[in-house]
Amino acid sequence: MARIFLGIESSCDDTAAAVVRDDRTILASVVAGQTALHADFGGVVPEIAARAHAEKLDGCVEQALAEAGLRLDQLDGIAVTAGPGLIGGVLAGVMLAKGLAAGSGLPLVGVNHLAGHALTPRLTDGIAYPYLMLLVSGGHCQFLRVDGPQDFTRLGGTIDDAPGEAFDKVAKLLGLPQPGGPAVEAAAAQGDPRRFALPRPLLDRPGCDLSFSGLKTAVLRQRDTLVAAQGGLHEQDRADICAGFQQAVADVLAEKTRRALAASPAPVLAVAGGVAANQTLRAALQAVAEAAGARFLAPPLRLCTDNAAMIAWAGIEAHDAGQRDGMDLAARPRWPLDQAAAPMLGAGKRGAKA
């Protein structure tokens, strides 16, 4: 008999709820964005995000259930993002999920947000384990070998800014609107990626680790050089810088992906996360996969960014693996997928950052 899970996601600035059946059918997926709330601040403000989640979560759940044509008591479980993320938002989602589980008696499953992204190809295409995943988003960038719903091996990742964070910062440096990824991609479409010689960080070092902080700094210096020489930035200058930056990110990700596939051959290379929506990056990664004889998979654009369908699906897989959580489920700001790997970005009282 088919099982149906409710998914709840609130780790950053998208409030989401979805209803997913275990045959990979998405019965409903609701996402309430917060772009307008943060537009004046140049980035996501955690306190504003947390309040918005608290206000919107129950409405998103009600809407998802209505679109699926189901009542709460017709579900088989509740999956919720329990981390990592902005703690106020994560806490809002976890508390709502606990309340729903307590009131309905349904099983509760806490999901790692990164696992939601990493398992998205299982939801969209039903691929078998193992496969290689490049998780590339606003806050995270990792190469993962995925051997099961709770079995992840990190092959490498960013040691500083994630690509999405770098896109946002470059957009801010160039006076482009947020979110920065789509704005930079749109400007880059009109630009010449060869005009400015921007660095490709860490390509001179072995392994699959990445760094984008120096590339962002190079963009800042190029901008300042142009401003000093001509009193400001022309639109073509902005477009050319964006094109050069985007191409540098694509070149770095392509080479590191090539190394990851060589180190851990897999039949499928999948990409997920918000930055996976960038068409230049997708094209570069697809070329690498084809050269390595691997199938390339990228989710539909609506499943690249944060959503609750991926959380519901990850919850179904975790539930099948025997996971059950109680009312002591904790909201976690940090939660590495590969628990055995050394921290990439340091650790503190709250645990490893990545």
Image: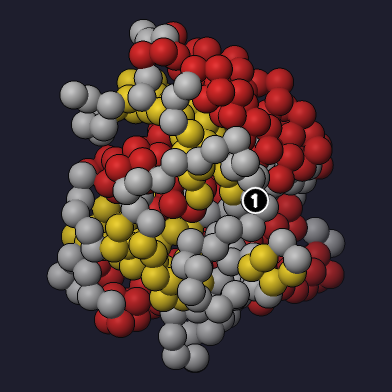
Pick whichever, 296 or 70, lies toward us.
Answer: 70
On the image, the x and y values in percent for residue 138 come to 58, 53
Q: Is residue 19 left or right of residue 199?
A: left
Pick whichever, 154 or 180, lies toward us.
Answer: 154
On the image, the x and y values in percent for residue 337 come to 48, 61
Q: Is residue 320 left or right of residue 187?
A: left
Location of the C terminus by quadrant is: bottom right
In terms of image quadrants, where is residue 98?
top right
Q: What count of labels does the image hold?
A: 1
On the image, the x and y values in percent for residue 256 come to 41, 76
Residue 306 sits above or below residue 101 on the image: below
Identify the residue shown where x is 71% and y is 25%: 54
In terms of image quadrants, where is residue 353?
bottom right
- Helix, strand or loop status at disc 1: loop
On the image, the x and y values in percent for residue 164 come to 58, 56
Alpha-carbon neighbours of circle 1 within 10 Å: few (<14), some, or many (≥20)? Answer: many
Location of the N terminus by quadrant is: top left
Picture colour scheme: secondary structure
For residue 192, say whether it is visible: no
In terms of image quadrants, where is residue 320?
top left
Q: Amino acid at mark 1?
A: Arg
For residue 72, say whether it is visible: yes
Identify the residue shown where x is 59% and y is 75%: 344
Q: Which residue is disc 1 drawn over?
A: 332
Identify the residue shown where x is 48% and y is 34%: 108
Identify the residue shown where x is 28% and y is 26%: 3
